[in-house]
Image: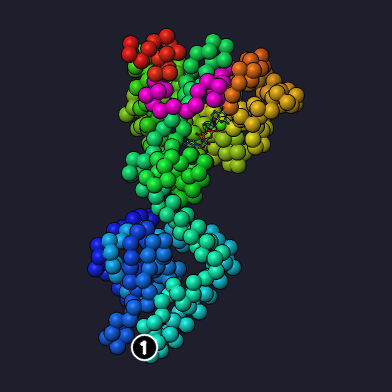
Amino acid sequence: MNYQMTYSPGTTILEEGATGDCAYIIDKGLVEISVIRDSEKIVLATLSDGDIFGEMALISGDVRSASVLALVPTTLSVICRPYFQEKLAQTDPIIAMLLRLLLARFHEARGKLLSMPKVCLAGINAKSADPGSAAENEAQQEVLLRFKFINDLQSALAKQQFFLNYQPIYLLDTGNLAGFEALVRWKHPQQGMIPPNQFISIAEDTKEIISIGYWVFERACCDLKKMRDALGVAQDSAEPWMSVNFSPVQIKDPNLPERFGQILAKSGVDPCSIKIELTESVLADNPQLTLAFIHEVKRLGLKVAVDDFGTGYSSLSYLHLFPIDILKIDHTFVANMFCDLRSREIINAIVAMSKNLNIDIVAEGVETKELEALLLNLGCRYGQGFFYSRPLLFENALAFLKKTQGMTHEEG
Ligand code: C2E
Ligand code: CA
Ligand code: CA
């Protein structure tokens, strides 16, 4: 687990000869790197914002080769060895070998350097000795920024920086609001609003998506319960429902069925009104595991939707193999309908087959009235897209819901 630390001026962050297995990125501050030779302190460098130190121990696990002192209030992002080792294990073995070789060479060179007379050592600044090429510096900055982003992401849940938007899903024939899709957002303290496609894959890499996923599921269940209570709908009413996105990493979490059961019970929401969205590629990549997962969540009373249909393998056989309740046709496929007769024919076939199997269809990315009319003609039941509404904050989603049910917000 990576995290952040703050040090006041005069604090020793690392001591030469001590054991340690973390590296540090300076988010803000100034530190001094020094060694003691013949009882005398020799300053090797001063480092500031964006610089990294302690990286040798991260790779080798060796004792610290220098001391580090905070000169001003200094905030550091800490990169821990288990995290780095996991990344190293996944990396090309040749790259890992080169890294170790480079480290051995560095130790050798450093040994020679430190046996030089003190007067020569005192003038050496690690930064100015080898400033590196512009491209190298840029690449290093990119890596540092990525580490910082990962660290920020890992603390975002604890700092309550996530929130959900709800995008309405409509019944095409009646024009009534049937449900919502919960879409996560991250409000970064410096970078502002970050859309999910910029952090979900990183959260999947670091497995942080498991905790984020529980938070999303709980928030979405509680908010749906609030919406249903505000409308006074019967507990077992099919609408309004809530769709929640799921990552393949979450499927591998053995605690998920139990935790979900607890969250459902705590929120008091009817499990039938929650739909788990799994992408088509999840079904194709690991069919056995996914089938077992689907059976588990169905045992809890939840419904299952296949998301982004038409982007991957698009095999209609999935509809037979998996007990699916809803199929969401991807917006790119929907958008093609106008210009491409084949897309229209395929949607026609999907709709016909789904009807036989009792699977409902949601068309995603409905942006125009014409598209809505065409989808209605093809027999699609639900539509979602900017034509109806952009994703909304909870309060606005509730107001929207009340309006379509013939009530105003104030009346509720
Ligand atoms: P998705 O599941 O396909 O979600 C629909 C995305 O399409 C949303 O983007 C939504 O804002 C956008 N959209 C809605 N209507 C229209 C339209 O008419 N036209 C166009 N062009 N786009 C439309 P968003 O919110 O940026 O989400 C992107 C993706 O991030 C989602 O795609 C989903 O895969 C992922 N995601 C979002 N929330 C979560 C979450 O809580 N957990 C996980 N694992 N993934 C999530
Ligand atoms: Ca989705
Ligand atoms: Ca989708």
Looking at the picture, which amino acid does disc 1 mark? Val
Rendering coords of residue 44 (x, y %): 37, 77
Compare residues 372 and 266 and report the one nearer the observer: 372
Residue drawn at x 48%, y 44% is 199
- Mark 1 and ligand 1: say if the CB distance to the nearest ligand atom is below 8 Å: no
The local secondary structure at tag 1 comes to helix
Dominant SS type (magenta): loop
Residue drawn at x 36%, y 71% is 46
The residue wearing badge 1 is 119
In the image, the segment drawn in magenta is: 381-398
Rendering coords of residue 179 (x, y %): 47, 21
Quadrant (top left, top right, bottom left, bottom right) of the N terminus:
bottom left
Residue drawn at x 25%, y 62% is 8
Coloration of the structure image: rainbow
Tell whether 224 sits left or right of 359. Answer: left
Report which quarter residue 344 is drawn in: top right
Rendering coords of residue 33 (x, y %): 35, 73
Q: Is residue 197 above or below residue 342?
A: below
Rendering coords of residue 139 (x, y %): 53, 61
Quadrant (top left, top right, bottom left, bottom right) of the C terminus:
top left
**For the residue carrying disc 1, how many other residues have a C-alpha within 10 Å: few (<14), some (14-19), or many (20+)?**
few
Residue 147 among those drawn in magenta:
no
Q: Is residue 406 above or below residue 317?
A: above
Q: Is residue 91 visible?
A: yes
Report which quarter residue 182 is drawn in: top left
Residue 392 among those drawn in magenta:
yes
Residue drawn at x 41%, y 76% is 125
Compare residues 317 and 132 and report the one nearer the observer: 132
